[in-house]
Image (tube, helix red, strand yellow):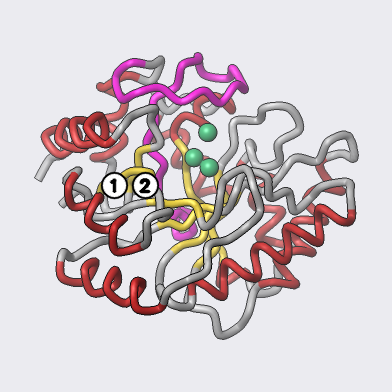
Amino acid sequence: MLHIGCHLSAAKGYYHMGQEALKVGADTLQYFTRNPRGASAKKVDPEDIKKFVDLMEEHHFAKIVAHAPYTLNACSKDEHLRALAKRMMAEDLETLDYLPGNYYNFHPGSHVGQGIEAGIGYICEALNEVLRADQKTTVLLETMAGKGSEVGSRFEELRSIIDGVEKSDKLGVCLDTCHVSDAGYDIIHDLDGVLNEFDRVIGLDRLKAVHLNDSMNVTGAHKDRHAKIGEGEIGVEAITRIINHPALRDLPFNLETPNDLEGYAAEIKLLRGLYEA
Ligand code: FE
Ligand code: FE
Ligand code: ZN
């Protein structure tokens, strides 16, 4: 069975978000742990989370993905911003203790001028500070498009991060189809080749989730503009191969396409129809 969901909001509570997921035909979801552009986190209501966890169990949800805010930059040149990133990550991971066994996805960051090696060093430093031996959440590094000075658009960079983290058993990778294509990996014509490369450099056992997006731009464009499924350069045929690929087909897929709830429901229905039983 295809595990698919979409990006939803937790602003009205977790249980409300779970009900929205059911409404669009999802059996997983992704949400921002806090305002994506701001820093403040909503106070958690344990009762609400409990109801949400029960709902997920009842409806056999696959693992869900909590996404860190875009503003979080663990490899900023500014020490104050690095400290803020660590504080947000530590807090988010504490909140996620209420939702044990799920994923926390973050963008490795942008090194803005200091160079990729210094950036990777800071990311490792942050993870070495915030990862706890007793946490039940797996932290996912998202594959990036390579826009500006983004870290994580090459599999080798993600490997270097994993290699620099002591509790690397807490780390995985989330593959964003728009981002990898924009980064120059040809998932349209050579999905096998790209996944072999992923396996060689990172190891497919680290791949835990997929962001399923079409891209407004061609392979290698380094842009990061998501398109609706079938309305971008990746196209429905390649996306059908992606959701059915033996290395991917059992992972949770989340749409981050420009859609309202109705649009998400339609895409989820389309994709369920393209999945080979
Ligand atoms: Fe993301
Ligand atoms: Fe993404
Ligand atoms: Zn993106």
Residue at 37% from the left image edge and 56% from the top image edge: 12
Q: Name the residue under label 1.
A: 5
Local crowd size for mark 1, using a 10 Å CA cut-off: few (<14), some (14–19), many (≥20): many
The residue nearer to you, when weighing 153 against 190, is: 153
Q: In which quarter of the image is residue 276?
A: top left
Give the quarter of the figure containing the C terminus.
Answer: top left
In magenta stretch: residue 204: yes
Residue at 31% from the left image edge and 25% from the top image edge: 229
The numbered dot on residue 8 is 2
The numbered dot on residue 205 is none
Residue at 37% from the left image edge and 47% from the top image edge: 8
What is the secondary structure assignment of the residue under circle 2? strand
Q: Quadrant of residue 113?
A: top right
Asked if marks 2 and 1 touch (Cβ < 8 Å), the reply is: yes
* Magenta segment: 203-231
Using the numbered discs, state the Cα–Cα distance from disc 2 to disc 1 in whole angstroms.
9 Å
What is the secondary structure assignment of the residue under circle 1? strand
Observer able to see residue 202? no
For the residue marked with disc 2, what is the amino acid?
Leu
Q: Where is residue 264 in the image (x, y as percent from the top left)?
A: 26, 35
Whether residue 129 is situated above or below residue 204 in the rendered picture: below
For the residue marked with disc 1, what is the amino acid?
Gly
